[in-house]
Every structure is written in C-alpha cells, then in structure tokens.
Amino acid sequence: MKSPFPGMDPYLEGFLWPDVHNRLAGVISELLAPRIAPKYVARIELYTVNDTSPESEIGIMYPDVEVFLRHDEADEPEVMYERDTGTTTPNIIIPSNMSVPVRIPVVGIRDTAKNRLITAIEILSPVNKKQPGLVPYREKRAKLHQMGVHLLEIDLLRRGIRPFIHPMLPPSHYVMMLLRAGTHNTEAWTIQVQDVLPVLPVPLAAPDLDVPLDLKTALDIIYERSMYQLSIDYRKDPPPPAFDDAEKVWMQGILSEAAPPRA
C-alpha cells in the first residue's frame, strides 16, 4: 500500500522519522547504484551528532531516551520541602541537560578508482535544524564545498530552521537543494504538501552527466516495505507545525478518499 499523499506524507515527520530517515538513505543508495556503476558506488556513511535537547522532539525520537529517563528517575531521590525542612518549595524545576548521540546516515557517491567522495546526499534530521546542531552542520556544508564535493540536501521536515536561508526562497513545506562543486549557485526545489516530489539530479565528476533520483519512488518503496500505514492514524492531525485551514481542507479530501483503514 502506498501513502495517500501525492508527495511527502507529513505523518512520517513524527515518531516514525528515524526509521524513515534510515530506510530512505538505503533506498536512495539502492536506486542509484545500478545507474552509476561501474565507475561509481553509492555507500551509506554515518556520522554522529549529540542532541542536547531530545525532549523537545516529537514522540520518542530516539529509542534510548525513554530508558535513560526511566533509569534516571529511578535513581533520583525525592526532595521534601516545607513540611520537613521549613524551606520554600521552588516554583520552577529545570531539568538538567541530557545529550543523546544521534547517528545520521548520508549517501556518499564515490569513484571506484580512488574512493574519492564525489557527491554527498544529506537527508536532514531534526538535530541538523536546531541549535546547537545547526552550527556544525552549516560548517560541514561549507567544508564539503571547499573540498570540491557536490552536496544534494533533502529537507522533508517542516519543523526547525533551514541551514540555508535566502530571500529568493519562497515559503514552502519542504525544500531540496543542490550545491554543485566549483559553483556558487544553489539550485532549489521548493515543495508544498500538495505537490508531487521532484526527480532530482545527482551530479557526478565531470564530464559525466547527472543521474536522476526519483524521490517519490524512493518514498513509495519505503512506505510499502515498512507498512507505515499500520503505525499511522490518519484520523488524527499530523505532527506539528500545524497546517493552515486551506491545507487542512485539502488533506481531509485526500484522506477521506484514500486513507488506509484502521483495524
């Protein structure tokens, strides 16, 4: 079964996102591999970012967070005020910072002759779009450009701060950007929830031509393989941020016709 949405399914932006992120990277690599062989290979490469505010995320974004919190709370001594000590109860209790390591998959296109990184395909994570992770991610973007690596950036999350902001970019729910090595122009695809996702160009080393990446096909594959409809209740509102009234009416029409039934 496919998602009822013609493009990005906003219901995938919540607690399912870590699974969506990992599977999407794998399928993108799978789709590109036969198109770029034998001169290039597509590999999944991981890097780690520490999320210092995991509690701000939607749902249980990281599997270890809930266990960590339960363990922490079990060891936390109960503090008694006023009745036993005569002191005044605080009106605010601020939780201590908790850092959770988040492993982020990147699709790296490498040449088979020298194993050089030619193109990096980044699927943005929530930790890339909020402080403090936003700053090092922006630094990574700049470093890749300085190294002569093409960067294809896929942002399928409405929440957070985009790493690249420009007055020419119109407001949009989703955006894909391509910064080609050796240029200073950014190619952008701005997408609304009503839109079909684009077929993106994946650049290789000159003089080789770009290869196409059908983002909608990739999402359809992971949706069907993972049977996401079993974990989504389309009768409820999608994860925040909220859509405007016109968008909600459109979504209701889509879902009334095509939403998968719940048991």
Image (cartoon, rainbow, N blue to C red):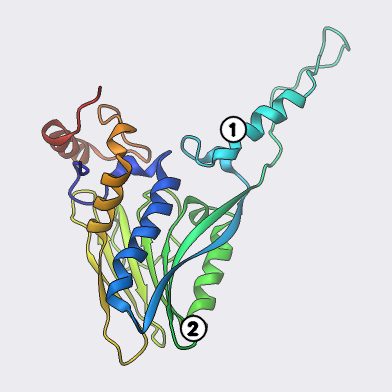
Residue drawn at the location 77% of the way across and 17% of the way down: 89
Single out the residue that lies furthest toward the bottom: 207
Compared with residue 249, is residue 39 higher up or lower down, i.e. above or below?
A: below
Of the image marks 1 and 2, the number of the one nearer the N terminus: 1
Describe the element under mark 2 as helix, strand or loop.
Answer: loop
Instruction: Write down the quadrant of residue 123 in the picture.
Output: bottom left
Locate the C terminus by quadrant.
top left
Q: Nearer the viewer, mark 1 or mark 2?
A: 2
Amino acid at dot 2: Arg
Can residue 93 be seen? no
Q: Disc 1 versus disc 2: distance between alpha carbons?
A: 39 Å
Can residue 124 be seen? yes
Single out the residue that lies furthest toward the left: 257
Residue 19: image location, x then y, percent = 42, 46
Describe the element under mark 1 as helix, strand or loop.
Answer: helix
Locate the N terminus by quadrant.
top left
Name the residue beneath numbered marker 2. 116
Residue drawn at the location 30% of the way across and 52% of the way down: 173
Pick the residue in front: 166 or 143.
143
* In this rendering, position of residue 143 left or right of residue 84: left
- Local packing at callout 1 (Cα closer than 10 Å; few below 14, some 14-19, many 20+) is few
Residue drawn at the location 31% of the way across and 55% of the way down: 174
Residue drawn at the location 41% of the way across and 52% of the way down: 21
Q: Which circle marks residue 66 in the picture? A: 1
Single out the residue that lies furthest toward the right: 85
Residue 200: image location, x then y, percent = 26, 69
Amino acid at dot 1: Glu
* In this rendering, position of residue 72 left or right of residue 79: left
